[in-house]
Image (cartoon, grey):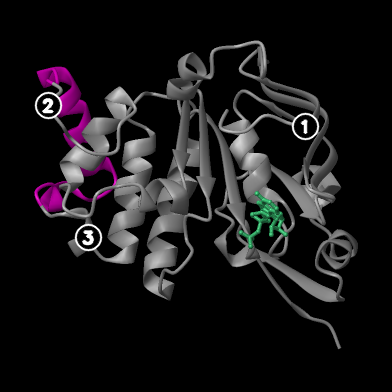
């Protein structure tokens, strides 16, 4: 099985603060990872490195076999699909849903004068269709609901047929039905043997789709625990991650947690 990510003692320092401290983490082809941790744990910082947007201050980060600092990141980035609030904010609101997906083919966020192949247009439409959004293809991005926007963003992140897909808080801001629809779709994606390696960042166990195989638990820029979800997602590790006693429940591959009295 080939390595998708291999981080060795990765640290990111800003001023006197360690945003990440000695993080070692490996993701292999076919794995579906959850990255869990409280606000400020360093999850997005870690994802920025995984998406080849940020260099570690110390340590080595290998992405799809290439070492950060020794590779042209512009060649690496099309191989990594990224869906995050930062990507969403960079999309011009008036862009249509179809263009939001299509422009990923050129690593752009807004359509300018580039010419797209029919093949690209068909692929973009196909992805919108797969994510239940083809009827919205001509609707502008800023007129979509939060849940619709999230699905368009995921379709966009798959446009270049990436080898790694990073979803940074894909269910943030969704209502219950929106969250459950998205989680079900992500579960389908996790079960698809042709899907890229998946990394999904969340604060909430309820947002972990069934079928995800591994979990990285973080606190204060450090790894609390990492490994197969069945062995690693324990009440003990949850308490160490969130700093409070939590009761863990699991049912049909889904999880939830509550404060323990
Ligand atoms: N450029 C920066 N300079 C200084 N501190 C920063 C910088 N970027 C992030 N931080 C700090 O680093 C810490 C980790 O931030 P990060 O966004 O990675 O956490 P997170 O786990 O994704 O949090 P959240 O769940 O709230 O999104 C936070 O305390 C944040 O304030």
Residue 153 relative to residue 142: left or right: right
Q: Is residue 178 magenta?
A: no
Of the residues under marks 2 and 1, which one precedes in the sequence? 1
Residue 184 seen in render: yes
Q: Quadrant of ligand 1?
A: bottom right
Residue with the mark numbered 1: 57
Mark 2, residue position: 113
Cα distance between the residues tagged 3 and 2: 21 Å
- Return the residue at label 3: 142
Q: Main secondary structure of the magenta part?
A: helix
Q: Nearer the viewer, mark 3 or mark 1?
A: 1
* Bounds of the magenta segment: 115-138
Q: Distance from label 2 to label 1 (Cα)?
A: 38 Å
The reply to whether discs 3 and 1 touch (Cβ–Cβ < 8 Å) is no
Which mark is first along the chain, 1 or 3?
1
Residue 29 at x, y = what percent? 61, 23
Quarter containing the N terminus: top right
Is residue 229 at all visible to an observer of this figure? no
Secondary element at image label 3: helix
Which residue does the image show at 66% across and 19% down from the upper left? 68
Task: Specify the quadrant that holds the C terminus.
Answer: bottom right
Q: Is mark 2 within 8 Å of ligand 1?
A: no
Instruction: Determine whether 172 is above or below 130 in the image.
Output: below
How many residues crowd mark 3 within 10 Å: few (<14), some (14–19), many (20+)?
some
């Amino acid at each position: 099985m080939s390595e998708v990510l291999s981080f060795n003692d990765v640290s990111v320092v800003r001023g006197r603060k360690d945003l990440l401290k000695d993080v070692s983490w490996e993701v292999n082809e076919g794995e579906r990872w959850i990255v869990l941790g409280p606000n400020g744990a360093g999850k997005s910082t870690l994802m920025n490195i995984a998406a080849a947007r940020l260099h570690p201050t110390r340590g080595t980060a290998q992405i799809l076999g290439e070492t950060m600092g020794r590779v042209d990141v512009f060649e690496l980035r099309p191989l990594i699909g990224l869906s995050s609030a930062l990507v969403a904010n960079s999309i011009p609101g008036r862009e249509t849903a179809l263009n939001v997906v299509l422009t990923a083919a050129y690593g752009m966020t807004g359509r300018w004068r580039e010419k797209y192949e029919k093949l690209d247009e068909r692929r973009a439409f196909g992805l919108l269709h797969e994510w239940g959004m083809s009827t919205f293809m001509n609707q502008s991005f800023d007129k979509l609901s939060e849940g619709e926007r999230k699905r368009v963003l995921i379709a966009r992140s798959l446009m270049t047929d990436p080898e790694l897909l990073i979803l940074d808080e894909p269910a943030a801001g969704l209502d219950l039905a929106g969250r459950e629809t998205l989680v079900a779709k992500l579960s389908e994606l996790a079960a698809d043997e042709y899907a890229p390696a998946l990394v999904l960042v969340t604060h909430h166990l309820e947002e972990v789709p069934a079928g995800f195989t591994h979990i990285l638990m973080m606190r204060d820029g450090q790894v609390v625990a990492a490994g197969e979800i069945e062995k690693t997602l324990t009440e003990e590790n949850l308490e160490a991650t969130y700093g409070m006693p939590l009761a863990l429940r699991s049912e049909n591959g889904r999880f939830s947690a509550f404060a323990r009295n």
